[in-house]
Amino acid sequence: MIQRFHTFINEYPKTFWTLVLAVFIDHMGSALMYPFLALYVTRHFNVGMTQAGQLFAIFAVTSLTGSMIGGAIADKFGRKKMILFGILASASASLAFGFVQDLNLFYLVAGLTGILANAGSPAQNAMVLDLLPQEKQASGFGIIRVAYNISFAIGPVIGGLLANHNFLLIFLLDAFLSLITAGFVYLFIPETKPTPTAHQAGQSLAMTFRGYLGVFQDRLYLLLIGALVLIQMVYEQLNTTLPVFLRDTHGVQASQFGLLLSLNALMVVFMQLWIAGKTVKYPPMLVMAFSGFLYMIGFGLFGFVAQIPWFALCIILITIGEMTMSPVMMAMVSRFASEEKRGRYMAVFELGWVLPNTFASLCGGMVLDNLNPQWLWIGCAGIGFVVVLVYLALHGLGGQRLRIPDQEFRFLYKN
């Protein structure tokens, strides 16, 4: 067992594991703060959830701007610089959250946080692509997801204990963890940006930003992003409308729903790497279609079942779909982006997460409030079916680069 563990560790470069540790430490700060941010805003400023919802909408929209800026700068000046900038901006924002006493100013801080702190996200994802060979990228992103989920298993517990004493302690600890991460990245992670050609080195920053035009002219890539937007609109119901639906329709208590979410997190922690290792054997778009099918069945069943064991089965199907889809989806960017455009492609990729975060709960809530709640889950199943068709279409339209498994891809495709 120990020998197998050492073999597994040695399959990835040391710099990658250093990045995973840095991601874990930094995300621990987010995990202990963001679950309690709505509680802090409503209590500290004596406002309702509408105002808190506006705060999260501001953050979601501005984070897209930050990603677009950060992706271009990461391609021009390097990944490490943008990662450090985003981490330090996040530390500053946490301190500002803790000391701002005016709600409008708090909104302003949230907007600036979205722009500045999220600027490092495309650089981080691009660094994973820089560090790992093609056949290891899906499993590499799977390892990153495990680190995320472990931090979310620990962070909210610490955050809840600190919130019982003083919310300011949460913001201070988040800022402290960000500073530790920044020091870690500065000292131990080298720059991974590929050496530019003479033509690329001579490009101005404005020309780098104009490179987004090429990304938005990549029709297959936009089709992939469109499918991601749709499936994430479905997935976001898990954390927004589903607990309300289960409470109001089936009398499911918050503690019972918490156990269902724990099932999701535990499955990711213990099964993600195994599933990521299995998916590289199959054409990626067929893997994506399979995961979309699991989403279709898992979310659709909520409209037709009424007992906890069935709800648990739905969560299991959804989680397997999630573990199958996410690492493959992240790794797919390298099949579209040349090395010098990875930051910008990753920035556009984040559209698939930001747009659903902004609109999914609103759309789902309107269905719950105005129609038979069952239609929400029928609608989710219908969207899942459309996404499956899109992935199958991409499998057919994308040529070899979208049809062959990862372990063979590096030999057959030249970007």
Image (spheres, helix red, strand yellow):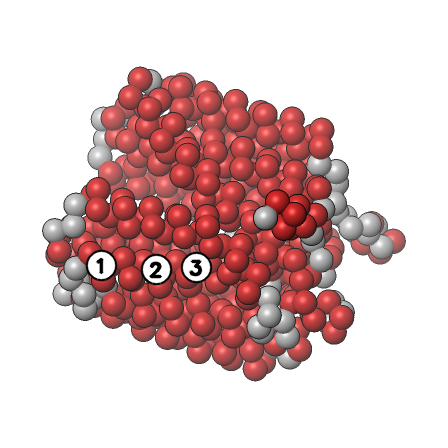
Question: What residue appears at the point 39 percent right and 48 percent down from the top-left corner?
Answer: 265
Where does residue 381 sit, x and y in percent of width and height? 31, 70
Q: Which residue is mark 1?
A: 309
Question: What residue appears at the point 40 percent right and 19 percent down from the top-left corner?
Answer: 169
Q: Which residue is mark 3?
A: 322
For the residues labelled 1 and 2, say whether their Cβ atoms are less than 8 Å apart.
Answer: no
Q: Earlier in the sequence, mark 1 or mark 3?
A: 1
> Circle 1 sits in a helix, a strand or a loop, which is it?
helix
Question: Residues under labels 3 and 2: Cα distance?
Answer: 10 Å
Question: Residues under labels 1 and 2: Cα distance?
Answer: 10 Å
Local packing at callout 1 (Cα closer than 10 Å; few below 14, some 14-19, many 20+) is few
Q: Which residue is mark 2?
A: 316
Local packing at callout 3 (Cα closer than 10 Å; few below 14, some 14-19, many 20+) is many
Question: What residue appears at the point 60 percent right and 35 percent down from the top-left corner?
Answer: 22
Number of marks in the rendered image: 3
Amino acid type of the residue tagged 2 in the rendering: Ile
Identify whether 100 is placed above or below 372: above
